[in-house]
Image (cartoon, rainbow, N blue to C red):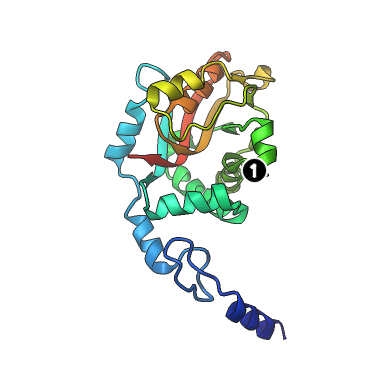
Amino acid sequence: MKNFFESFTQLIFPNLCICCKGYLSSQEKYVCDLCNYNLSLFELNELINNNLRAKFWGLLPLYDCLAYLIFKKDNEVQKIMHEIKYNGNKELCYEMGLVLGKFISSHRNTIDVDFIIPVPLHKNRENQRGFNQAEILANGVSRIIRVPVLTDGIRRSVDNKSQTSKNRFERNKNTDKIFSLPNSAVLEGKHVLLLDDVITTGATILSCGQILLTVKNLRLSVAALAVTN
């Protein structure tokens, strides 16, 4: 009876790939096999990850810095992030966190991380959206690498305007002094993995990282699901 109901529901409300809008088979989830293959074409190579690290050279002393995918306009990665951020697909966000966690676990520099700290949203923004995508990603990563998520590690004290239309200079100015540390003592001497969904100019990571590095003997690594190229 359950199989009949599921088949009937699938007929009336078919599952579609969020990238190409084609029909999904019963073995596929969110993204069809073809788009999954295309997604693999946007996995970052070591050269691009080196370019990502270069964003923070001379600004943040990082133990490690890595991202999994390349974010480009209208590519599969952009469509996935749109589905998560604007359609509120929290389950997909968690699944991508699991994928990111497997990627992170393959990097030896992150094996001794003590805490994962997701980049926070201001409470007004989080209440409006209903969730913080970086936190859900972090929960997925946490399940794979078995490191606790510290959701109150950083607090966003200023609800700054959307960053999507700003250039690097404007973003850097817009993120200045908007974060605070509610409990720095718990971070002393720890290795922290600062995690975000997408790194663009790096201004938000820079602002979060700078305040984290005011903590005594803290080591900082950075990870993201995607980075703009």
- Disc 1 crowd rating (10 Å Cα; few below 14, some 14-19, many 20+) is some
Q: Name the residue under label 1.
A: 129
Residue at position x 69%, y 82% in the image: 5
Residue 224, image x, y percentages: 46, 39
Quadrant of the frame with the C terminus: top left
User: How many circles with numbers are drawn on the protein?
Assistant: 1
The quarter holding residue 127 reads top right
Residue at position x 43%, y 33% in the image: 165
Q: Please, is residue 177 above or below residue 159 in the view? A: above
Residue 80, image x, y percentages: 47, 53
Label 1: which secondary element: helix
Taking depth in this image into account, of 42 and 102 the one nearest to the observer is 42
Kind of residue sitting beneath label 1: Arg
Q: Is residue 58 left or right of residue 23?
A: left
Residue at position x 72%, y 86% in the image: 1
Q: Please, is residue 101 above or below residue 222 in the view? A: below
The quarter holding residue 178 reads top right
Taking depth in this image into account, of 173 and 62 the one nearest to the observer is 173
The quarter holding residue 37 reads bottom left
Q: Please, is residue 70 above or below residue 55 in the view? A: below
Residue 133, image x, y percentages: 58, 43
Seen as rendered, the residue at the extreme left is 47
Q: Is residue 99 visible to the viewer in this orientation of the structure?
A: no
Residue 81, image x, y percentages: 49, 49
Seen as rendered, the residue at the extreme right is 1
Q: Please, is residue 133 above or below residue 60 in the view? A: below
Q: Is residue 191 visible to the viewer in this orientation of the structure?
A: yes
Taking depth in this image into account, of 113 and 179 the one nearest to the observer is 179
